[in-house]
Amino acid sequence: SVSTFTVVNISSLAFQWNANSNPSGTLYVAELSSVPGFSSLAGSSSTVLTAAAFTGLMANTTYFVQVKARNHAGTETAYIDLGSTVTLVGPPTAGLYNNVTPVAIRANWASEGNPQGTLYIAELDDDSFFSSINLSSMTVNTYADFSSLAINTTYYVRVKARNALGVETAYTDLGSTVTLANPPVILAPAFTLVGISSFAFQWNANSNPSGTLYVAELS
């Protein structure tokens, strides 16, 4: 018999089998396990249908299923292996940015119940429409570090999760952050146009881009 998984979600799945000429009313015992040898069960269903459904499952987890038939006298067939599938992953939820420097940021998210080892794909762009991805990161962590960025520049990040079969969630928007500006440095001569009641002074931008705002104070 060939397994047919009809529904696979984050925490539930359903499957069906062929009755193989058994009459209506035949009892079937379907079992579900995250262990190939079925040494422990995640669920069991006795049914006269040729289908079973299980809920309350773990995300991104491989589940194996088997089924046997029982006649009216209680005599059972051997179990038939119906194969396995992997539950879906949940979409990550947005966290805050940290470790922000002039040339690097860390984007964070929450797993939302996905188990350790779940793969995440994070993408960074200086365009909110992600028309051209600047950097990407594939990681089993719930964060991604991006470096070699432009100084004082707005960056946007999105992330998606992928289960063990390669099925992915939609992207989760992590919003945006701005890399820091470099501190200006002294330019010699610093003071220019010194007069009786006024003077001007200048500094080096220290690689900050055009448009960077500076706050100058006099005391």
Image: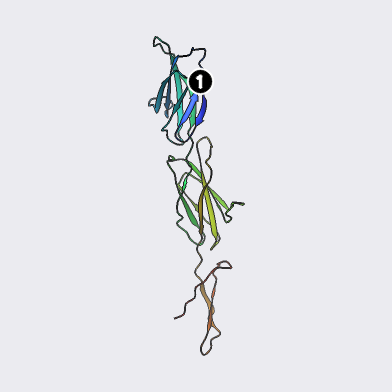
**Looking at the image, can residue 43 be seen?**
yes
Question: Could you say whether the residue bearing mark 1 is in a helix, strand or loop?
Answer: loop
Q: Position of residue 104 (x, y in %)?
A: 50, 58
Q: Nearer the viewer, residue 14 or 61?
A: 14
Q: Position of residue 7 (x, y in %)?
A: 50, 30
The C terminus lies in quadrant: bottom left
At label 1, which amino acid type do we have? Trp
Give the answer, above or below, for where 41 lies relative to 70: below
Circle 1 packing at 10 Å, graded few (<14), some (14-19), many (20+), is: some
Give the answer, above or below, for where 126 lies relative to 194: above
Give the answer, above or below, for where 18 lies relative to 197: above
Q: Position of residue 177 (x, y in %)?
A: 50, 58
User: Which residue is drawn at the image coordinates 45% and 29% (left, top)?
Assistant: 63
User: Which residue is drawn at the image coordinates 50% and 20% (left, top)?
Assistant: 17
Q: Position of residue 48 (x, y in %)?
A: 44, 17
According to the image, label 1 marks what residue?
Answer: 17
How many discs mark residues in the rendered view?
Answer: 1
Give the answer, above or below, for where 107 lies relative to 91: below
**Looking at the image, can residue 78 be seen?**
no
Seen as rendered, the residue at the extreme front is 24
- In the image, is 17 to the left or to the right of 113? right
Seen as rendered, the residue at the extreme right is 131
Coloration mode: rainbow
Q: Quadrant of residue 36?
A: top left
